[in-house]
Amino acid sequence: MSEISKDLLRPCPLCGGEAKLQELNYFRYARVFCTKCGLSTMEYPMIENGKDKLIKLWNSRIDGKEQK
């Protein structure tokens, strides 16, 4: 994972752990996951800005603290 992607990922919404981008299946798919609790996004194809879409998906969720 590049340092740029690491800096762009928000902490885990459940535990606050560090999030990382993991490339799978010979870089054909990727996912974002929490290194502490294991929460992750779905595996996403790495076509048409796949990494950017995963980062946006991970960062657009609602944190437990933000819910009413």
Image: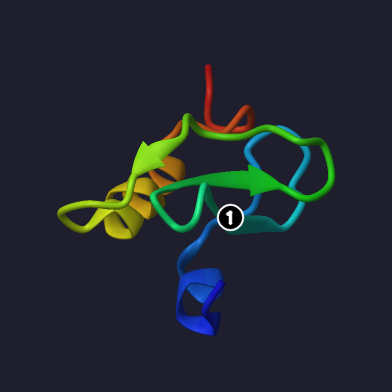
Q: Which residue is mark 1?
A: 22
Q: Residue furthest top?
A: 68
Rendered residue at 37%/38% (across/down): 44
Residue 13 sits above or below residue 9 on the image: above
Q: Quadrant of residue 51?
A: bottom left
Point 47% across, 29% down: residue: 42
At a point 54% along the width and 47% down the height, the residue shown is 32
Locate the N terminus and report the quarter of the image it occupies: bottom right
* Foreground residue among 37 and 64: 37
Relative image position of residue 56 (x, y in whole percent): 33, 49
Instruction: Please name the colour scheme applied to the rendered image.
Output: rainbow
Q: Residues within 10 Å of mark 1 (few under 14, many from 20)?
A: some
| Quadrant housing residue 65 | top right
* Three-letter residue code for mark 1: Gln
Q: Position of residue 52 (x, y in %)?
A: 29, 58
Residue 7 shown left or right of residue 33 in the figure = left
Q: Image point 60% across, 35% down: which residue?
A: 40
Name the side, left or right, on which 21 lies relative to 4. right
Q: Residue furthest right?
A: 36
From the viewer's perspective, tell me whether residue 22 is left or right of residue 14: left
Task: Indicate the position of residue 31 as horizontal and vertical percent values.
Answer: 51, 44
